[in-house]
Amino acid sequence: MPEHTSDSDERLHTSGERQARKPEIGVILGSASDLDRVGPVFSTLEDFQAGYEVAVISAHRTPGLLAEYASTAPGRGIKVIIAAAGLSAALPGALAALVDIPVVGLPLDVGTLKGIDALLSVTQMPPGVPVASVGIDNPKNAALLALRILGVSSPEVLSRLASYRESMAQDTVDKGRRVSEKGLPAWSR
Ligand code: RP5
C-alpha cells in the first residue's frame, strides 16, 4: 500500500514490472529540461503501481507532435494527462483544446517570474476549455490528482488513495507528538 513519503523519496521498479501495467495516465513535459522538477510525479505513480507513459512535447516548438499525441492518446487508453511546463506554459491549455479527457496542468518555476507566468498561463483558460491545475512546482499533487480522477472509475485506485491518506494522517500525528515531547504545553484530548 502506498505510504505518505517526502518528495525526494524515489523508488524504482523493474522495467518489466512497469511495462506490464497498461498506461492510463499520460505525462507530457514541455521540455527535457523539466525532467528533474517533475521527478515526484513518477515516484508517486510508481508508489501506486499506476500505468503511465511519458513524452516530451512542446506546444510552441513541436505543435504538430502535440496534435498527434492528442489525437491518439484516448485510443491508447489514456484517461487523464498531466502536462508540465514552465514560462509561458501553453502546453496544458493547447492540449485541453485538442482532447476531451481531463488535463492536469503542472506549472513550473523555471524563469525570472518564478512560475507565476506558468501558473497564470495554465489557470486563466477561456470558458469552454478547462484545465485543472496544481500549485507551482507541486508534482506530487499533480500525480495524486490524476490518480483521484482515475479513482472515480477504479475501486482499486480509490482504495490505495484511502490508504495513502490514512498514512499521511498518521505521519502528521506522529510528528505532532514529537513537537509536544519538546516540553511545550501540549493540547490534551
Ligand atoms: C517551457 O519552456 C518548458 O516547459 C520549459 O519549462 C521551458 C524552457 O524550455 P527549454 O528552453 O529548457 O527547452 O516550454
Image (tube, rainbow, N blue to C red):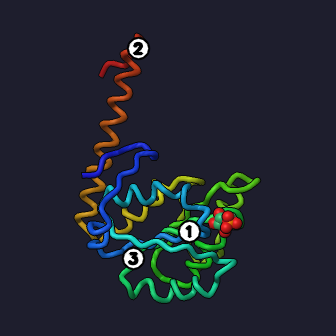
Residue 129 drawn at (x, y percent): 58, 78
Foreground pick, 116 / 111: 111
Check residue 84 in the rendering and tell me which mark sits there, or answer none. none
Foreground pick, 7 / 145: 7
Residue for point 49% across, 68% down: 82
Label 1 CB-ligand 1 distance < 8 A: yes
> Quick check: marks 3 and 2 in contact, CB under 8 Å?
no
Residue for point 64% across, 72% down: 125
Q: How crowded is mark 1: few (under 14 residues within 10 Å), some or many (20 or more)?
A: many
Choose top left, top right, bottom left or bottom right for residue 44.
bottom left
Disc 2 residue type (three-letter): Lys
Label 2 CB-ligand 1 distance < 8 A: no
Q: Name the residue under label 1.
A: 29
Q: Which of marks 1 and 2 is in front?
A: 1
Check residue 182 in the rendering and tell me which mark sits there, or answer none. 2
Disc 3 residue type (three-letter): Lys
Q: Disc 2 on helix, strand or loop?
A: loop
Mark 1 or mark 2: whose residue is earlier in sequence: 1
Mark 3 or mark 2: whose residue is earlier in sequence: 3
Residue 76 in sight: yes
Q: Mark 3 points at which residue?
A: 79
Disc 1 residue type (three-letter): Leu
Residue 98 drawn at (x, y percent): 55, 85
Q: Disc 3 on helix, strand or loop?
A: loop
Label 3 CB-ligand 1 distance < 8 A: no
Q: Residues within 10 Å of mark 3 (few under 14, many from 20)?
A: some
Q: Residues within 10 Å of mark 2 (few under 14, many from 20)?
A: few
